[in-house]
Amino acid sequence: MAFQIPRGTQDILPGEVERWQYIENTARELCKTYQYKEIRTPIFEHTELFARGVGESTDIVQKEMYTFEDKKGRSITLRPEGTAAAVRAFVEKKLFANPQQPTKLYYIGPMFRYERPQTGRFRQFVQFGIEAMGSNDPAIDAEVISLAMALYEKLGLTKLKLIINSLGDAESRKAHRDALIAHFEPRIDEFCSDCQHRLKQNPLRILDCKKDRDHELMETAPSILDFLNEESKLYFEKVQQYLTSIGISYEVDPGLVRGLDYYNHTAFEIMSDAEGFGAITTLCGGGRYNGLAKDIGGPETPGIGFALSIERLLAALDAEGVKLPIDQHIDCYIVTMGDKAKDMSVSLLYNLRKAGLTVEKDYEDKKMKAQFKAADRLNARFVAVLGDDEIEKNIISVKNMETGTQEEVSIDELVSYLSK
């Protein structure tokens, strides 16, 4: 029987995985400059965490989670996103008690959602995300957004569009919720079953429906911006002021609601304007979730974060034709001729690698010409040729593959010669 990879997953092979490593390393270095520390949470959690944290009315909880029972009958779910687990760890490990706040965390790891696979979207996908918990300062909102924008720009993307909105505080959201129910209820039977279910549970989610997005009531739906109280208005104005002060362009979109129940105040998405990127242009999404820690058993703690898919990021890089500056060379390839040379190459290889050099040799008893071809395929900067005669003289012939020059070096000095 020939086995095949499950639908919606992918093998990331050598030649491609280097792009992933470059992106992940860039993200880690950027987080270091912003003082975000890495957190690693379990791949699976108790299902109730996501039901309460992400929201019962979301597509993720209702349709997309990989959920199963363990041997003791407990409901377990493969994590569909990173925020709920990070906040659970924040609460459980009492990170809120640390004197230095906000607590600034980042994560990189696989997530799982059962949805229709398409370009840049998989059932197992990798998210990079950050969370800042413990501050109500709108400046941290601007910082979180700026980190996301900085990552895309560092990687070479230029066709970006930042969309922001305010979902307001609890008072503002209640007033908007009542207005949405009054707006949609008389004609709710014209909407899909999901929207009908959400009308009383979370009517804001109706605005995020993909099936009914062209319905005429969507165009005339009450805007959250008309229901913001004074405090929420001032907060949103401050976020915009800070974004402007650091030179980040944005558009305000009152229709931006995000797909998770825990958002309040600032919500944002970063989109790709690259031609040919596809119908779904969102690269990154995030926002505030001030009530989430309390919802999962912790103290009232403000928080904000974002998450982005590495797969979507790679698709955007391809759409813009961006080539990442990945070094595909090795430092040296050792060509051997004769049994003594073959035996000595083992220790040579070890010593060169111990010195931090990237080195390879032949393990298939290839002829000299074939070994040189292998060195070419590996983009070797130098080729060191070792034969039985060279061993007798304690020398090795080193060829610079870029210039074509060749010189003899003492075998004992090969490490220092190549290290220079």
Image: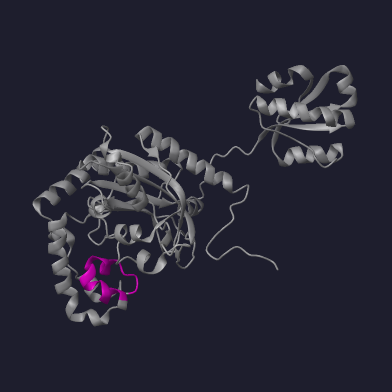
Q: Is residue 232 visible?
A: yes
Q: Which part of the image, by quadrant, shows the N terminus?
A: bottom right
Residue 178 in the image, given as x and y percentages of width and height: 14, 68
Left or right of residue 267: residue 4: right
Q: Is residue 101 above or below residue 130?
A: above
Left or right of residue 410: residue 381: left
Left or right of residue 294: residue 149: right
Q: How many marks can you see?
A: 0
Q: Is residue 118 above or below residue 391?
A: below
Nearer to us in this view, 165 or 301: 301
Q: Residue at x 36, y 65 (%)?
A: 61
Nearer to us in this view, 90 or 399: 90
* Rendered image quadrant of residue 200: bottom left
Q: Residue at x 23, y 40 (%)?
A: 139
Q: Residue at x 46, y 42 (%)?
A: 155
Residue 170 in the image, given as x and y percentages of width and height: 15, 56
Q: Is residue 160 visible?
A: no
* Rendered image quadrant of residue 412: top right
What's the magenta region?
Answer: 194-211
Q: Is 207 within the magenta? A: yes
In the rendered image, the residue lying farthest to the front is 72
* Rendered image quadrant of residue 397: top right
Q: Is residue 188 above or below residue 113?
A: below
